[in-house]
Amino acid sequence: MKARIYVTLKNGVLDPQGKAVHHALDGLGFAGVADVRVGKLIELELADGTSPEDIDGMCRKLLANTVIENYRIEQVEP
Amino acid sequence: MKARIYVTLKNGVLDPQGKAVHHALDGLGFAGVADVRVGKLIELELADGTSPEDIDGMCRKLLANTVIENYRIEQVEP
């Protein structure tokens, strides 16, 4: 089975990478961009029967820094 | 309006970050992880009426390296 983890910065947390991308888009002439936030997308290929609790544990222990980041788990059935 | 861009490495492209995460998950005792790939999730806050072609242009010119990365655009209507 597959799982996708979406890791995004919490609101209010400064995102220098997003700021840099925003600035670069402006420089390329793309008007109308109000804000850019950059997060992570982690694709896991897991053994069948891996429990949602295990996946949640992976996120809390390693994949996301829950002090400043939110995460969302999406399970993709085969 | 909002748009989310999902940037993932193409198949066959080596992903050292994913390998490192995989190794770390093994070290934490999470068995049954077969593969890990790490990509990017870019959230854009755009002026209403930004055309899909503009968003595609941002991806091709800046957000994704189309030599080694695929991207997928998801528009989120307000």
Image (cartoon, coloured by chain):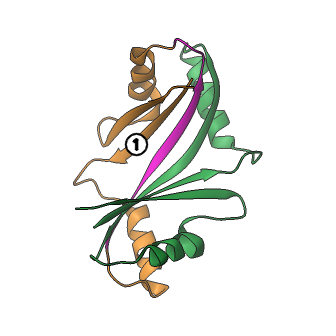
Chain colours: A orange, B green
Residue B75 at what x, y percent from top left? Answer: 37, 61
Q: Which SS class for mark 1?
A: strand
Picture residue at 49% right of the left edge, 35% below the top: A4
Is residue B38 highlighted in magenta?
no
Crowd rating for badge 1 (residues with CA inside 10 Å; few <14, some 14–19, many 20+): many
Residue B31 at what x, y percent from top left? Answer: 59, 13
Total of numbered circles in the picture? 1
Residue A19 sits above or below residue B72 on the image: below
Residue B43 at what x, y percent from top left? Answer: 38, 59
In the image: residue A2, left or right of residue A73: right
Q: Which residue is label 1 attached to?
A: A7
Q: What residue span does the magenta drawing correspond to? A: A34-49
Quadrant of the image containing the C terminus of chain B = bottom left
Picture residue at 43% right of the left edge, 83% below the top: A30
- The type of residue carrying mark 1 is Val
Q: Quadrant of residue A56?
A: top left
